[in-house]
Image (cartoon, rainbow, N blue to C red):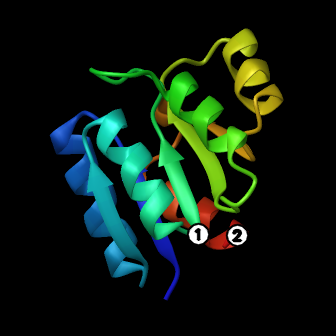
Amino acid sequence: MKSILLIEDDPFLSNIYVIKLEEAGFNVNALLSGKEALKEIEEKRPDLILLDIVLPDISGWEILEQIKKNPEIKSKIMILSNLGQKEDKEKGLKMGADYYLIKAYYTPTELVEEIKKII
């Protein structure tokens, strides 16, 4: 079973994503905090990290930067954010994210379909 770490600070949205992903057969762990996420990534090495950018403690940019400093972490990274400017998307991909999706453009069901294509 493929594992997904969801880093999303909106509890309502996080809940919806977790339900849809688990229904699709994924093992999902959801965290609201970036600091918690860094520890979890280091320990568990999920297959996919769904990463929001705007978080309450440290930003998704900082998390992405920390992940990319550790060559042992092979997780695919999908930024899932409402930051939809071209510059934001380019920055995320340049920093090493594998994918950049804008939340507002995907229903939870469509997000699951995108994830199935990549893991």
The kind of residue on which mark 2 rests is Lys
Q: Earlier in the sequence, mark 2 or mark 1?
A: 1
Label 1 residue SS: loop
Question: Percent from the top left, x then y, of residue 77?
Answer: 63, 49
Residue at 26% x, 67% y: name it: 19
Q: In what quadrant of the picture does the C terminus appear?
A: bottom right
Residue at 58% x, 69% y: name it: 47
Most distant residue in the bottom direction: 1
Question: Percent from the top left, x then y, of residue 45?
Answer: 53, 66
Vertical arrangement, residue 61 with respect to residue 4, above or below: above
* Of 40 and 110, the residue lying toward us: 40
Which quarter of the picture shows residue 97? top right
Q: Which tag is nearer the camera, tag 2 or tag 1?
A: 1
The residue indicated by pointer 2 is 117
* Of 50 and 16, the residue lying toward us: 50
Label 2 residue SS: helix
CB under 8 Å between callouts 2 and 1?
A: no
Q: Is residue 109 visible?
A: no
Residue at 68% x, 48% y: name it: 70
Which quarter of the picture shows residue 8? top left
What is the C-alpha distance between the residues marked 2 and 1? 13 Å
* Mark number displayed over residue 27: none
Question: Percent from the top left, x then y, of residue 34?
Answer: 36, 35
Q: Is residue 93 visible?
A: yes
Residue at 29% x, 55% y: name it: 30
The residue indicated by pointer 1 is 47
